[in-house]
């Protein structure tokens, strides 16, 4: 069943991009590199759907749709403020016999990067990230306020876009009966751009929950996928399909993940 699911999404990616007029090769290549850069000077609205397979004792499938607009602001000739806003929409299946299904919003996670272009190929950014208790159910997110540092580095030699984004969030307020939050995230990304807006990508999201015992702290995915930047009419779109095997996962954690993303791009002057 899962093989058919992956095949269907590959078909969607291929047919959607084949059915519309792509941007010129140079323009689509440059825009693809910007779309792959989490701190680029580019307004974008990604819809990132993550399906986690075989979660909990019942091996059910969880789905998380992250709506995560990115809005940059020019501060001066050397610095930009890049804001990233992540709001998850979560389908939480039953994890054990007698458990219920939940569907709703997760916790809102805005981040603010003060970004400097060190040289034409190297960009760095850092700032605060926050956790706001917007979840519509206790099972979809803790009733806690959190904050911590975040940073990103991006290197763009030739056709490559390589870098990493990291943060750690600690809870500082909220419902005292809820467990504390101490969560680490590292996403490294390696992209190689091909002709006509196509690219190969690997961007696993590595996480650690420091409140758990050492055997249940880490989620370590390995994998990658393919994507393309193309135009729907005059609207540039970045679409990608990726799959990741969790070589390390907590008890009851997902075995693997399928990530399908549609990202609307709004280049300045475009």
Image (cartoon, helix red, strand yellow):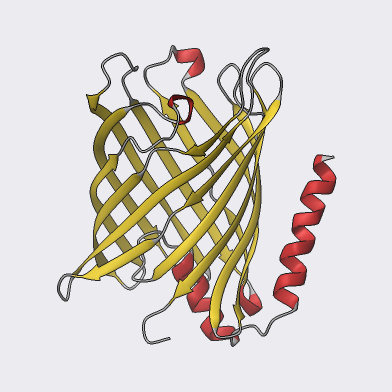
Using the image as rendered, state which of residue 87 and residue 259 is in the foreground. 87
Q: In which quarter of the image is the N terminus?
A: top right
Residue 39 appears in which quarter of the rendering?
bottom left
Q: Is residue 175 left or right of residue 47?
A: left
Q: Is residue 258 left or right of residue 110?
A: right
- Is 193 drawn above or below residue 54 in the view shown? below
Q: Which residue is drawn at 45% across and 32% down?
A: 207
x and y percent of residue 88 in the render?
A: 47, 44
Residue 222 appears in which quarter of the rendering?
top right
x and y percent of residue 64 in the render?
A: 56, 42
Q: Which residue is drawn at 44% across and 70% down?
A: 34
- Is 16 drawn above or below residue 86 in the view shown? below
Q: Which residue is drawn at 68% across and 12% down?
A: 97
Q: Is residue 236 left or right of residue 136?
A: right
- Is 28 drawn above or below residue 104 in the view shown? below
- Is 212 drawn above or below residue 200 in the view shown? above
Using the image as rendered, state which of residue 106 and residue 73 is in the foreground. 106
Q: Which residue is drawn at 24% across and 37% down?
A: 148
x and y percent of residue 79 in the render?
A: 19, 67
User: So how many labels did they put on this image?
Assistant: 0
Q: In which quarter of the image is the C terminus?
A: bottom left
Using the image as rendered, state which of residue 195 and residue 172 is in the foreground. 172
Residue 120 appears in which quarter of the rendering?
bottom left
x and y percent of residue 128 in the render?
A: 23, 45
Outermost residue, left side: 76
């Amino acid at each position: 069943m899962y093989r058919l699911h992956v095949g269907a999404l590959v078909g969607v990616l291929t047919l959607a991009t084949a059915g519309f007029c792509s941007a010129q090769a140079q323009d689509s290549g440059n825009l693809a590199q910007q779309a792959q850069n989490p701190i680029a000077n580019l307004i974008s609205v990604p819809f990132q759907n993550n399906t986690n397979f075989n979660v909990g004792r019942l091996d059910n499938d969880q789905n998380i749709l992250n709506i995560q607009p990115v809005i940059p602001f020019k501060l001066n000739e050397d610095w930009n403020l890049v804001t990233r806003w992540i709001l998850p929409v979560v389908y939480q299946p039953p994890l054990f016999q007698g458990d219920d299904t939940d569907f709703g919003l997760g916790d809102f996670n805005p981040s603010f990067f003060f970004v400097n272009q060190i040289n034409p190929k190297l960009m760095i950014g850092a700032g605060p990230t926050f956790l706001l208790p917007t979840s519509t159910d206790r099972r979809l997110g803790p009733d806690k306020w959190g904050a911590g540092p975040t940073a990103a580095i991006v290197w763009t030699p030739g056709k490559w876009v390589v870098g990493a984004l990291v943060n750690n969030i600690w809870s500082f307020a909220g419902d005292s009966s809820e467990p504390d939050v101490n969560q680490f995230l590292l996403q490294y990304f390696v992209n190689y751009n091909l002709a006509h807006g196509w690219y190969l990508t690997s961007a696993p999201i590595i996480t650690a929950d420091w409140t758990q015992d050492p055997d249940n702290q880490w989620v370590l995915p390995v994998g990658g996928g393919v994507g393309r930047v193309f135009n729907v009419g005059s609207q540039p779109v970045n679409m990608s399909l990726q799959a990741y095997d969790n070589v390390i996962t907590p008890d009851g954690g997902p075995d693997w993940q399928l990530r399908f993303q549609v990202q609307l791009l709004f280049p300045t002057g475009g």
